[in-house]
Image (cartoon, helix red, strand yellow):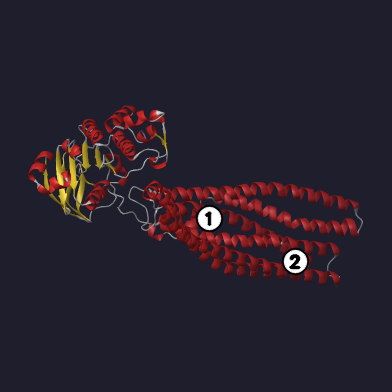
Amino acid sequence: MGSQDLSGKVVLRGAIAGQRRDVALGALLGAGHQAGEALVPVVIGAVIDRGVADGDLSGLLLGVVALGVIYLGLSFSFRFGARAGERAAETSAHRLRTRLVSRILAPQDGSPPGRLSGELTNIATLDAKRVGSVCMALVVGISALMGLLVSAVVLVRISALLGLVVLLGTLLLLWLGHLLSKPLEHRSGAEQERAAPAARVAADLVSGLRVLKGIGAEPAAVARYRTTSRHSLAATLRAARAQAWQSGMVLSLTGVFIALVAFIGGRLATAGDISLGELVSAVGLALFLLGPLSQFSWVNAELAQGRASAARIAEVLATDGTTLPGTDPLPPAVQGRLRLRAVSHESLRGVDMDIAAGENVGVVTTDPSDANALLGCLARRFDPDSGAVELDGVPLSTLQPAAIRTAVLVAEHDADLFEGTLLSNVSAAACSADTVERAMVASGADEVARTLHRGAETTVTERGRSLSGGQRQRVALARALAVDAPVLVLHDPATAVDAVTEAKIAAGLREIRAGRTTVVLTTSPALLATTDRVIFIEGGRVLAAGPHGELVSDHLGYRTAVLS
């Protein structure tokens, strides 16, 4: 099935099908529990007829024993049935979260357009949980249905009229409950849509907290969040009112229904058509029916919210990546030759580059959009509108994006660190311990470690906020160097360090990447001076290429870009 065919119904069916065993077990045990609950008033009625009205002591004792056995079964079935249902719900939600994260982090870029991190987090947590809860709702619904069926059978045996009232009344209440759940489904979807921007704004504000404090923008940020939060609160209250209205209406209708059953049973007992024990059983069953029918109200609400959440999940899972998967494997031994042939994409216009294997090349762009487009093409976040990018003569568009990542590492300027130790950040994808040590020396991250109280074992907080900008940049560079990829593309790797450190990084970078293809997008004279040659791009086109010193002397545009 293609991703374009994915819908909320498909997501729901898949969530249930993946846990059919636990759902079936929970439903079976739950049905047994509800059947036992329905039999309790029946046994009590029989005890009254035989043990009290007829004075049959053996019948009284037998009824008491039967009640004990029933309650023992109720305890077992409830405990293990609830466990199976909860396991199905939690496992289903977990698998959905895993699918969502895998889709969002897919090498071909699976993030849906217009959905930022806060919204995606909301979908992967609350929406996934609501869809998983549909499994538990099915268990409860099937169990409640069994309770209703047992009650109807018993009531039919007591009186055909009572059984008919229960069956028809139950079907009517189920239909009305379904109709009443429609507004809740709509408002639940609106609630989630309003909650997502609030989560997104909160995530953005937290990530930029230090910047906001630095420029004194806290009041404006708080006002922005307050406005978004109020909209989310209003949507939540509307959904809560819809749920309260639905539950209240269903409960009122259920009360009327039970009163009708009790009234008919009382009239039949008065007329002598049923015994005293049967009347007690009928009234007890009418009271018991309040539970299953109330559960149907809850089930309808869960299904309504589950459908709304499933539609949002389907939107993410059905998002087509920005690149086609590709089918060809990597060359057996990647040499690292890069070639761009008449590449045009966004601001780039017919760019031609030929970078030999093992060459260290600098790229200078006067427009940041040119750099971003070039980085995206080299990382294959997207394929160029025209032209081709080749690795060892093989077009990247024919290769699997995941395979490309093993050969071409594009280290973005704004790469984040992860929570953990400094060493674990550097060694996250390192090929060997020796490479980690060399990468830390080349990037200056070893100096960062020496300034910390526990050295390389010092814990780094989320996104590296416990480090300064220059320290984060050096650790991120060390992480990229430790991978020892055949092709490494760096984007402004030393903008946050001082001139002395920048010169050390430039020398260390050339030494550690000797014999490996390296492309550095930067305007730093220190880094460009250590490259084999520099390619100058302006207005989306290659205007010049050559050694850094020659371009500084001979090309005014280049000199202005790197020395101004």
Q: Position of residue 167 (x, y in %)?
A: 69, 68
Q: Image quadrant of residue 147? A: bottom right
Q: Residue 38: tell me if it is visible.
A: yes
Identify the residue at image location x=45%, y=47%. Answer: 98
Q: Amino acid at mark 1?
A: Arg
Which of 70/379 is in front?
379
| Residue beneath disc 1 | 130
Q: Position of residue 374 (x, y in %)?
A: 23, 49
Judged left or right of residue 195, residue 489 is left
Which of 24/89 is in front?
89
Q: Residue 189: tell me if it is visible.
A: no
Mark number displayed over residue 274: none
| Residue beneath disc 2 | 156
Judged left or right of residue 327, residue 307 is right
Residue at the top extreme?
A: 434
**Marked residue nearer the N-terminal end (1 or 2):** 1
How many numbered marks have been drawn onto this rendered protein structure?
Answer: 2
Label 2: state its secondary structure. helix
